[in-house]
Amino acid sequence: MLGLSDRDSKIILVLLIIAVVVLPYVLYTKGLREETEVIKGENVELQARLDELQEMNKNRDFYIAETKRMQKERDELIASFPAEINQENYTMFMQYLEVNSRVKADENFLAQEEDDDDETPLFGYSGIDGNTTFLISSVGYNDNDYIPIGDEVNPSDYTGIINDSVLGFTCYYDGFRYMLDYILNYDDPMIYKKLEVEYDPDTGELEGEMTIEQWAISGNGRKLDTVPAWPDIDELDMRGLELHLFGPLSPDALYTHQLFEVYLEELAEEAEEEGEDDGFDVVEE
């Protein structure tokens, strides 16, 4: 090499050879050390997961049983909700509410005895037939709100349904208590979320309006059973509207409703006979 002694040239040459040979090795081993540290960290995580899985495997039967139990509870919870909220179902809910309250009033009348000191009549009050009777004066049926159940992380085949409808009513205190209990214990889940009531001190009459909230869960092949209409819906020409509410009444359903009407007539006759015997004046509808 120019300007260098043979000894210096040899030293430089050796250093270059060492650099060419050793440097890649050093860089390679450095990369290996870094990868080793990463693998060690992953091994720690994997070991922790392995320990967790092994512990779970020891209780495998318990977890399987618990999973089945929770799935059963989920299915039972979903089954407790209707698959849809239809206008005809709500219509029949209101009719059941009114009809059942009248039956209860008649039964209470038959069970009561005359009290000369009590001037409060058993029946009467602006033509309302019985203290437990609940009469519906107005209805406002709103559209359903559909709310997805689940998200991208936890998808679900089910959809939640909520309906808020307004109901105007007239009743007395006993009828008011009956109505609240009837709503809270109705087969289809619902509750009153807003309530306004006015009291007439002269007649003891309650008049008000409430918002009833209903719930349902649709999806995964769930279907709502058809609700049969009562015969008087035909008499009022309410069947076969533009929305085709209800549909044809089956012979079995018609026979059942006819039997119920006969039962109501028998109760009314018994109440009238009992009232005549005891000196009561029975107010007819």
Image (cartoon, rainbow, N blue to C red):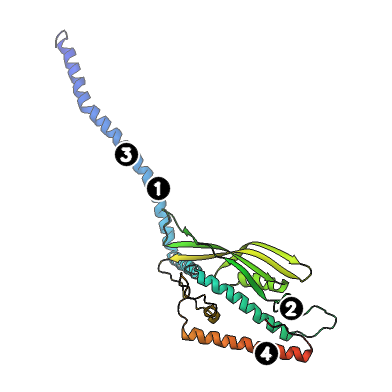
Q: Is residue 204 visible?
A: yes
Q: Earlier in the sequence, mark 3 or mark 1?
A: 3
Q: Mark 1 = which residue?
A: 45
Quarter of the picture holding the C terminus: bottom right
Q: Earlier in the sequence, mark 4 or mark 1?
A: 1
Identify whether 266 is placed above or below 181: below
SS at mark 4 in the image = helix
Q: CA distance from mark 4 to mark 2?
A: 17 Å
- Residue at the extreme top: 3
Identify whether 74 is placed above or below 240: above
Q: CA distance from mark 4 to mark 1?
A: 82 Å
Q: Which mark is drawn over residue 121?
A: none
Q: Which mark is drawn over residue 35?
A: 3
Q: Are marks 2 and 3 in contact (CB under 8 Å)?
A: no
Q: Earlier in the sequence, mark 1 or mark 2?
A: 1
Q: Quadrant of residue 124?
A: bottom right
- Density class for disc 3 (Cα within 10 Å; few <14, some 14-19, many ≥20) is few
Q: Mark 2 = which residue?
A: 124
- Density class for disc 4 (Cα within 10 Å; few <14, some 14-19, many ≥20) is few
138 lies left or right of 200: left
**What amino acid is labelled 2 in the image?**
Gly
Q: Are marks 3 and 4 in contact (CB under 8 Å)?
A: no
Residue at position x 19%, y 13% in the image: 8
Residue 77: percent from left, percent from top = 51, 68
17 lies left or right of 234: left
Image depth: mark 2 or mark 3 in front: 2
Q: Mark 4 = which residue?
A: 269
19 lies left or right of 60: left
